Amino acid sequence: MINGVKIKKLKVLPDERGRLMEILRADDELFSKFGQVYMTTAYPGVVKAWHYHKKQMDNFCVVKGMMKIVVYDDRKDSPTKGEVNEFFLGEHNPLVLHIPNLLWHGFKCISDYEAICINCTTEPYNYDKPDEFRSDPHKNDIPYDWGRKDG
């Protein structure tokens, strides 16, 4: 696993009324501070990638559908420099994925309907000076192919 990336398995508590699932708590190992919570979605087969943050850390939880979230480490002095990690989050695998700052990341909807991701960030979005640095999803130096891997 890339240095600093963490996952938390989530407990789903169902009963005859519905279900409850805690995502992130202030006393979790993953939690460092609160910036904001937002929702992002992707339609089937859509890739939203690549980007990284200089300050912000992300905590992703896919609450509808399934997403493949990919993280790439190109940090100069990292012991895991050059590593790529894939994570499958969503209804069939309820997790929180903690992505530290300075790591390239992105996601692809792999369900046959819109997937919904909740992100609890450590920094609020700065509209005047966004902490977001982007690269093309397919034409870049990141050693990853977003195509489905059959076999």
Image: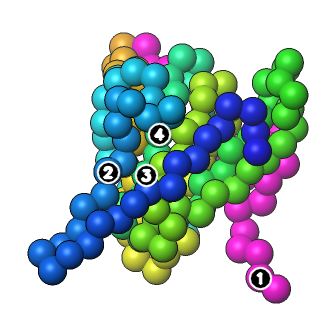
Q: Magenta span covers which residues?
A: 129-151
Query: What is the crowding at mark 2: few (fewer than 14 residues within 10 Å), some, or many (at least 20)?
Result: few
- Residue 148: name its quadrant: bottom right
Residue at the image position 83 percent from the left and 24 percent from the top: 78
Q: Position of residue 1 (x, y in %)?
A: 76, 45
User: In the image, which is nearer the foreground, mark 2 or mark 4?
Assistant: 2
Query: What is the crowding at mark 1: few (fewer than 14 residues within 10 Å), some, or many (at least 20)?
Result: few
- Residue 119: name its quadrant: top left
**Which mark is first along the chain, 2 or 3?**
2
Q: Does the magenta stretch include residue 141?
A: yes
Label annotation for residue 33 = none
Q: What residue type is labelled 3?
A: Cys
Residue at the image position 46 percent from the left and 23 percent from the top: 32
Is residue 72 depicted above or below 101 in this figure? Answer: below
Proximity of marks 3 and 2: CB atoms separated by less than 8 Å: no
Secondary structure at badge 2 equals loop
**Which mark is first along the chain, 2 or 1?**
2
Residue at the image position 46 percent from the left and 80 percent from the top: 112
Is residue 34 depicted above or below 98 in this figure? Answer: above
User: In the image, which is nearer the foreground, mark 1 or mark 2?
Assistant: 2
Label annotation for residue 150 = 1
| Colour setting | rainbow
Is residue 30 depicted above or below 123 in this figure? Answer: below
* Residue where numbered disc 3 is placed: 61
Question: Dominant secondary structure of the magenta stretch?
Answer: loop
Proximity of marks 4 and 3: CB atoms separated by less than 8 Å: yes
Query: What is the crowding at mark 3: few (fewer than 14 residues within 10 Å), some, or many (at least 20)?
Result: many
